[in-house]
């Protein structure tokens, strides 16, 4: 799956999510949590630490739109939106697990899905720019004050493509 496009990555992670959520034992719930964090990263274009913070805020507060600290930046925050297919069942199954170490998520991504977590972030930006933007342009998009609106529009569109809370 290395270097896969957004749709391929999304499909693969959603399949793993469905498999993990059908196994309510601790190991299945841990995999669900880890895959959900990867999905948050993919659908928001976040660094892995930002995705972990976003998911933790979701499972502890139930908030679907949260601001997370921008990695490598003091005092700056960025909007993160929990995808529409995650819901109360995810909170119920993963809340007691807490947040794993970053190394755990990196390991799951590389060993199970053969992908680096930064590939998820870049797949998101390539997708929203139609694959036409170079990384300088993507960096400019990230610095836009209105990026939150782009992200909200994206999640609205994604919500129409996928069924809610699967």
Image (cartoon, grey):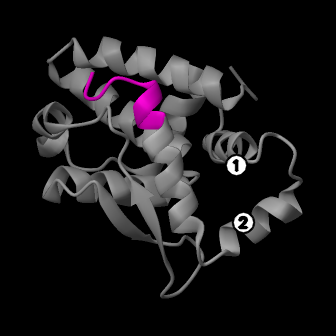
Residue 165 colored magenta? yes
First in residue order: circle 1 vs circle 2: 1
**Viewed as shown, does residue 56 lie left or right of 101?**
left
User: Which residue occupies 48% across, 23% down?
Assistant: 13
Asked whether the beta carbons under mark 1 and mark 2 sit within 8 Å of each other, the answer is yes
Q: Nearer the viewer, residue 105 or 33?
A: 33
Q: Nearer the viewer, residue 100 or 152?
A: 152
User: Which residue occupies 72% across, 25% down?
Assistant: 4
From where the camera sits, is residue 70 visible? yes
- The stretch in magenta equals 158-166
Vertical arrangement, residue 70 with respect to residue 6, above or below: below
User: Which residue occupies 33% across, 26% down?
Assistant: 31
Q: Position of residue 26 (x, y in %)?
A: 17, 24
From where the camera sits, is residue 38 visible? no
Q: Residue furthest bottom?
A: 75
Q: On residue 34, which mark appears?
A: none
Q: On residue 141, which mark appears?
A: 2
Q: Position of residue 93 (x, y in %)?
A: 14, 32
Q: Nearer the viewer, residue 30 or 17?
A: 17
Secondary structure at badge 2 equals: helix
Secondary structure at badge 1 equals: helix
Quarter holding the C terminus?
top left
Q: On residue 125, which mark appears?
A: 1
Vertical arrangement, residue 138 with respect to residue 160, above or below: below
Q: For residue 162, what is the image quadrant?
A: top left
Q: Position of residue 137 (x, y in %)?
A: 84, 62
**Viewed as shown, does residue 139 lie left or right of 59?**
right
Vertical arrangement, residue 102 with respect to residue 12, above or below: below
How packed mark 2 is, by other alpha carbons closer than 10 Å (few <14, some 14-19, many 20 or more), is: some
How packed mark 1 is, by other alpha carbons closer than 10 Å (few <14, some 14-19, many 20 or more), is: many
Q: For residue 135, what is the image quadrant?
A: bottom right
């Amino acid at each position: 799956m290395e270097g896969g496009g957004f749709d391929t990555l999304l499909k693969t992670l959603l399949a793993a999510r469905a498999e993990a959520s059908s196994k309510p034992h601790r190991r299945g719930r841990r995999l669900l949590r880890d895959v959900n964090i990867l999905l948050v990263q993919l659908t928001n274009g976040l660094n892995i630490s930002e995705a972990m913070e976003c998911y933790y805020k979701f499972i502890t507060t139930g908030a679907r739109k949260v601001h997370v600290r921008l990695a490598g930046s003091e005092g700056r925050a960025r909007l993160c939106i929990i995808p529409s297919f995650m819901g109360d069942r995810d909170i119920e199954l993963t809340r007691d697990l807490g947040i794993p170490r970053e190394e755990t998520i990196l390991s799951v991504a590389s060993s199970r899905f053969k992908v680096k977590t930064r590939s998820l972030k870049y797949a998101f930006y390539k997708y929203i720019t139609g694959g036409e933007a170079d990384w300088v342009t993507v960096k400019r998009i990230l610095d836009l004050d209105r990026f939150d609106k782009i992200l909200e529009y994206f999640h609205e569109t994604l919500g129409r493509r996928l069924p809610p809370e699967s």
